[in-house]
């Protein structure tokens, strides 16, 4: 089987990106020779994406929506990200997403649980408006309990005011 | 800001961080230390003479007088004579030479002795409190406890002396619940802890790798309600402290948060968002039936019962920013009660119902403020930038709260008037959401 060089490169980039992400699912990077096999039989059900697009498509790889202080409006720069995830969810009705809402440390913990949920709901509404099905989406708020950055300044707070789009089923 | 000033500021901050780290390393998690931040000139001078031991065996490990003394000092209302300045050691009233203590400008003197039960085990602690100027006996009582339970005996003696002198029931023989978080990244470990009011005798109520928050005491002090993310989403549990038996009382979709037992212990107020937005509900604990108290699209949360159980105070951002509101326990319209400060949230209500502590935000500064409902004025009683979670002692004389210092959340105790503030170091890592228990009952 002859694969176009672009697919191989994409697979390598994707595995490197996975390895670089110091998340829960960090696995050793797959040897290069095996990488193309993972991409060999993509499930393409007629739409523009395959399941692997989640790792390779530059838009779908954007999984975090950031918010202004005490706000839950989705800013214009995140519209493209919302649109591509909605398109993916439309194409793969079996795909499931958890929207994890978060707040910065300012204010009280329980109020921030509410704020995180409000942000999660804003992304939920935007995805449904763009064609995702409500049954594909689940909102969980962690409030200020899961900061990605622990400095006490705006540079850090803005990274914590976020909704993470987490795929729990890809197709 | 000039580069030089910035550099100095950074250096100062770095030093401060090192000092904090050193403080943290020097402590084992079961030895709380207290730094007194302010003294107060109005504190009442009192001597607590080291208690004499009268028995055949070894004296107990607990220094009863030291425990009483640190309780009284922590209240901010007393100033005990330092141990080195104590020149005589009377163990009973008849041995007190009043001119000595008059000369040392002491208003009160507490003496006592620990008498070992001839059968072993129990120790009878006899104590007497005197007014030095009047040479008058104010108290002469005895409390019996096990060798291992002498801290409890000491806290009870401190309560009795405090009440005799101030006229207000003491709250030293109480407990505090709090949440600790240790580790970073994927190795964070959360624990819900219970300790004595001075931070000693910490015991773990529950441990989790997922966030734990919002502990709330049942009015009998036997149970804690709390929020746990162990199921992936927030859920509310009620757990018996002594046995560890627990029940998940709310695991609905969305937020299950901010539990608060009603004063009669029969109901639980809570925040639920399964219907779309966080609203306040009341659960009947016997039937688990829910009554919805608030409605609408705002974030309504942090319900706290007024001491009479007839109404609740809660946080809502219905007017834009979070403010405190009051609503009848049977529902209806809510009334806004805070008008000073951009942000007012997470009320803790004093036993008199007239003083309400809260987190007050102005710009990026969040401090603990006390609202006096008689005047409608609120005054800050903390000095940090990210202070959180006030909790009144059951007698309203002190509060606990948390401050963020460097990368840590630490605990502070502050007198109700804000004059005396002390840092309590209970454990390595973050200590959050200190929650003062109700009064304890004997035999508990």
Image (cartoon, rainbow, N blue to C red):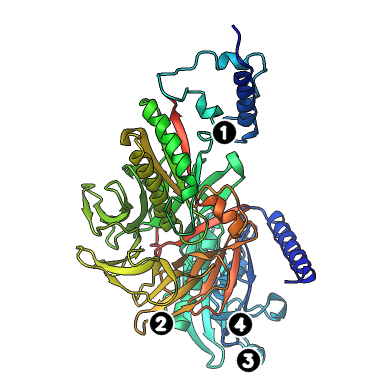
The foreground one among A53 and B211 is A53
Mark with earlier residue (4, 2): 4
The reply to the same-chain question for discs 4 and 3 is: yes
Rendered position, B392 above or below B260 = below
Element type where label 4 sits in the image: helix
Labels 4 and 2 touching (C-beta < 8 A): no
Mark nearest the camera among 1 and 3 is 1
Mark with earlier residue (4, 3): 4
Instruction: Using a 10 Å C-alpha cutoff, classify the residue at mark 3 as few (fewer than 14 neighbours), some (14 to 19) or many (20 or more).
Output: some
Q: CA distance from mark 1 to mark 4?
A: 68 Å
Quadrant showing the N terminus of chain A: top right
Mark nearest the camera among 4 and 2 is 2
Q: Position of residue B3 (x, y in %)?
A: 78, 68
Rendered position, B300 above or below A6 = below
- The residue labelled by disc 1 is A24
What residue do we see at 51% from left, 29% from top? Answer: A54
Q: Is residue A88 left or right of residue A159?
A: left
Instruction: Using a 10 Å C-alpha cutoff, classify the residue at mark 2 as few (fewer than 14 neighbours), some (14 to 19) or many (20 or more).
Output: few
What residue do we see at 62% from left, 25% from top? Answer: A15
- The residue labelled by disc 2 is B377
Subunit under mark 4: B
The reply to the same-chain question for discs 1 and 4 is: no
Q: CA distance from mark 4 to mark 3?
A: 15 Å
Element type where label 1 sits in the image: loop
Corner quadrant of residue B60: bottom right
The reply to the same-chain question for discs 2 and 1 is: no
> Residue B95's mark?
4
Subunit under mark 2: B
Subunit under mark 3: B
């Amino acid at each position: 089987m002859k694969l176009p060089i672009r697919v191989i490169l994409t697979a390598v980039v994707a595995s490197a990106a996975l390895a670089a992400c110091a998340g829960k699912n960090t696995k050793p990077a797959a040897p290069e020779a095996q990488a193309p096999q993972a991409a060999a039989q993509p499930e393409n059900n007629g739409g523009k994406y395959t399941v692997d697009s989640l790792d390779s498509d530059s838009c779908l790889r954007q999984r975090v929506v950031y918010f202004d202080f005490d706000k839950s409006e989705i800013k214009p720069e995140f519209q493209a990200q919302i649109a591509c995830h909605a398109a993916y969810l439309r194409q793969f009705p079996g795909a499931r997403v958890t929207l994890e809402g978060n707040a910065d440390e300012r204010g009280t913990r329980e109020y921030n649980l509410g704020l995180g949920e409000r942000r999660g709901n804003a992304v939920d509404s935007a995805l449904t408006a763009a064609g995702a099905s409500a049954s594909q989406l689940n909102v969980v708020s962690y409030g200020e309990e899961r900061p990605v950055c622990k400095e006490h300044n705006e540079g850090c707070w803005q990274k914590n005011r976020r909704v993470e789009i987490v795929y729990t089923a890809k197709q | 800001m000039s580069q030089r000033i910035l550099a100095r500021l950074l250096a100062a901050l770095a030093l401060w961080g090192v000092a904090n780290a050193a403080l943290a390393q020097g402590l084992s998690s079961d030895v709380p230390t207290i730094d007194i931040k302010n003294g107060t000139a109005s504190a009442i001078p009192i001597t607590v003479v080291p208690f004499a031991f009268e028995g055949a065996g070894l004296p107990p490990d607990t220094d009863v007088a030291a425990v009483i003394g640190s309780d009284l000092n922590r209240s901010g209302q007393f100033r005990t004579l330092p141990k080195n300045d104590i020149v005589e050691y009377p163990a009973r009233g008849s041995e007190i030479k009043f001119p000595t203590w008059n000369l040392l400008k002491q208003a009160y003197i507490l003496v006592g002795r620990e008498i070992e039960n001839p059968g072993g085990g129990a120790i009878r602690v006899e104590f007497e409190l005197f007014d030095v100027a009047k040479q008058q006996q104010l108290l002469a009582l005895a409390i019996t406890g096990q060798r291992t339970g002498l801290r409890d005996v000491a806290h009870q003696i401190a309560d009795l002396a405090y009440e005799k002198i101030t006229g207000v029931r003491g709250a030293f023989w109480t407990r505090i619940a709090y949440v600790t978080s240790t580790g970073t990244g994927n190795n964070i470990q959360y624990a819900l802890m219970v300790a004595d009011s001075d931070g000693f005798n910490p015991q773990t109520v529950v441990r989790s790798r997922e966030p734990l928050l919002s502990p709330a005491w049942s009015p009998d002090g036997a149970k804690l309600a709390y929020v746990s993310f162990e199921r992936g989403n927030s859920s509310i549990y009620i757990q018996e402290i002594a046995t560890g038996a627990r029940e998940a009382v709310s695991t609905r979709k969305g937020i299950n948060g901010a539990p608060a037992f009603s004063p009669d212990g029969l109901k639980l107020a809570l925040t639920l968002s399964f219907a779309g937005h966080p609203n306040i509900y009341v659960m009947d604990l016997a039937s688990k039936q829910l009554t919805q108290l608030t409605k609408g699209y705002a974030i309504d949360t942090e319900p706290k019962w007024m001491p009479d159980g007839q109404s609740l105070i809660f946080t809502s951002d219905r007017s834009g920013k979070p403010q405190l509101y009051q609503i009848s326990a049977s529902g209806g319209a809510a009334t806004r009660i805070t008008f000073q400060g951009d942000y007012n949230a997470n009320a803790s209500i004093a036993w008199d119902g007239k003083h309400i502590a809260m987190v007050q935000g102005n710009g990026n500064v969040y401090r603990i403020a006390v609202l006096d409902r008689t005047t409608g004025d609120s005054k800050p009683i903390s000095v940090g930038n990210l202070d959180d979670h006030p909790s009144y002692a059951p007698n309203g004389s002190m509060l606990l709260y948390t401050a963020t210092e460097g990368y840590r959340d630490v605990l502070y105790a502050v007198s109700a008037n804000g004059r005396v503030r002390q840092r309590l170091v209970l454990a390595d890592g973050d200590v959050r959401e200190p929650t003062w228990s109700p009064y304890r009952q004997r035999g508990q």
